[in-house]
Image (tube, rainbow, N blue to C red):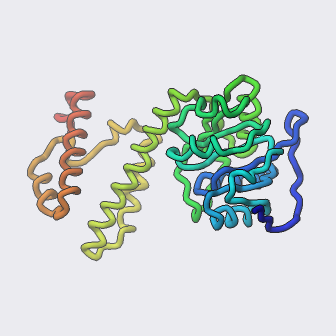
Amino acid sequence: MLWYKNNRKTAEPVLSGKRYKVVFIGAGNVATHLSLAMKEAGIPIIQVYSHTKENARNLADRLNCLYTSNAEEIRKDADIYLFSVKDDVLQDIIRKIPENKGIWIHTAGSIPVAVFKGYANRYGVIYPMQTLSKSRKIEFHKVPLFIEGSTPASEKEIRQVAEMISGRVSVMNSEKRKYLHLAAVFACNFSNHMYNLATQLLEDQGIDRHVLQPLIEETANKLQTMRPDMAQTGPAIRYDRTIMERHLALLEDPGMREIYEIISADIHKKIIYHDPLRFEKD
């Protein structure tokens, strides 16, 4: 069954003489930010699909468009079908989409563009390299978008759309993009997990987690002008076992002790390998 929130019409942008209409497959964090950025840029979203009706409806409410939780009811008259779903369900969703003439685009960092081969004639990727949460508004025009197209013509159209919502658009093939995504996991997801562990340590002692904020900000700001290896500080560089053993004694969680040991050893190994004299300098 199809649902519609209201009948207000949105002006359709004209790019190279063509009117673009978009269907979103997915209603999660990336889909929410990307679709709202498109709406703000004047690109009409005509439908949202999610296997969960409530999620589809919530996003459609914000976009003023149709929504459905039945893949067979996805409209066939869109110019762009934007797939923003979990990596492990993308292939299954692709198989369910009714045949159409639109450009199929996914937003995954680690999935090759060829995932669409055999299902669509024109396809590509728009990968936003940013951490996105529904509840937090961001300036999407500053988000780096990495694009790829199955043909030069498709890539040109994808670039036109991407440049309407971001001022930082780059072409990157599937092989390089998977390494970019891996690097993003280390830089964002893993570092955020470290913030989480640090927060747990502080909260267990009744210390406000916000005391870490200046440290976190300066750590990030240094990378504007310094390589990470040159910005590294702390006891692991010197492999100061006296301090490290004191830290380990404070950690009751075996998992946290293991993380501490592994990362400390790797910091020391990497720094010494790239800069043997660093140990003496510090």
**With respect to residue 122, does 88 lie above or below?**
below
In the displayed structure image, the side of residue 66 where residue 140 appears, left or right:
left
Q: Which of 72 and 160 is in front in this view?
A: 72
Query: Which residue shows up at 87% across the image and 56% down it?
Result: 10
Find residue 214 and report its image quarter: bottom left
**With respect to residue 24, does 207 lie above or below?**
below
Counting from the top left corner in percent of width and height, residue 12 is at 87, 49
Find residue 83 and report its image quarter: top right
In the displayed structure image, the side of residue 94 where residue 215 appears, left or right:
left
Query: Which residue shows up at 70% across the image and 65% down it?
Result: 57
For the C terminus, give its image quadrant.
Answer: top left
Counting from the top left corner in percent of width and height, residue 243 is at 13, 53
**With respect to residue 95, does 11 lie above or below?**
below
Counting from the top left corner in percent of width and height, residue 124 is at 66, 33
Q: Can residue 139 be seen in this view?
A: no
Query: Which residue shows up at 81% across the image and 46% down it?
Result: 21
Find residue 4 and report its image quarter: bottom right
Q: Which of 100 and 135 is in front in this view?
A: 100
In the displayed structure image, the side of residue 243 where residue 41 appears, left or right:
right
Q: Residue furthest top?
A: 152
Query: Which residue shows up at 39% across the image and 36% down it?
Result: 227
Q: Which of 260 and 208 is in front in this view?
A: 260
Q: Which residue lies furthest to the bottom in this view?
A: 206
